Image: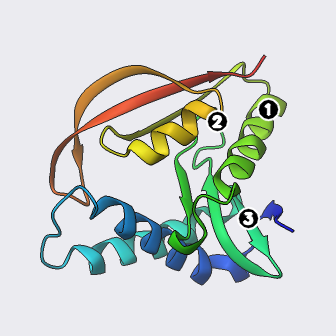
Amino acid sequence: MVVIRPATQADIAALAAVGSRAWASNIFSFEPELPGMRAHVERAYQAFAEEHFARVLVAEVDGVILGWGAREKNDDYISDMWVDPGHQGQGIGSLLLKALKADIAAAGYATARLESHARNAGAIRLYEREGFEIVHRSLEWSESLERKIEKVKMLANLT
């Protein structure tokens, strides 16, 4: 059974590992891998987990973290959603999104926001199944890819 719970400091290494594996598994299916990119991304996920673990919800089974989602600024924006590649397609992302949306609604917001790489079709399908709609497309700088990429901004009504 999947348990959704707040992350703790003890989860930092697992958050970094799951995030960087999920990112690499996904992004390299439609973007070229630049030299040193994986190491850069692993460091970025480690730093994110160390700084923001208190704003993360994890999905775990038998004590093993299989995915996580974050509200980096504790507002209406879902900054991160990552499911370990070996466990994608099992409903973990949906459970995390539902829990994050419930937290956002409980904080008094009427909508939830997120964004994604426009070529991340799997994630966009998940978000749309969970009530998000694309409201904007634009080119934005990507630190990890070191260039501008097309991103979509998505919105879900919570009322």
**Residue 97 as seen in the image, left or right of residue 159:** left
Label 1 with label 2: CB-CB less than 8 Å: yes
Where is mark 3, residue-wise? 59
Q: Mark 3 or mark 1: name the one nearer the start of the chain.
A: 3
Residue 92, given in percent of the width and then of the height, sits at 69, 58
Q: Nearer the viewer, residue 48 or 87?
A: 87
Q: Secondary structure at mark 2?
A: loop
For the N terminus, give its image quadrant. bottom right
**Residue type for callout 3:** Ala
**Residue 94 as seen in the image, left or right of residue 86:** right
Where is mark 2, residue-wise? 75
Where is mark 1, residue-wise? 107
80 shown above or below 76 = below
**Residue type for callout 2:** Asp
Q: Nearer the viewer, residue 147 or 74?
A: 147
Q: Mark 3 or mark 2: name the one nearer the start of the chain.
A: 3
Q: Quadrant of residue 100?
A: top right
Q: Secondary structure at mark 1?
A: loop
Q: Nearer the viewer, residue 5 or 95?
A: 95
Residue 41, given in percent of the width and then of the height, sits at 33, 71
Which callout, 3 or 2, points to the residue nearer the camera?
3
Mark 3–mark 1 distance (CA, rounded to whole Å): 21 Å
Q: Quadrant of residue 69?
A: bottom right
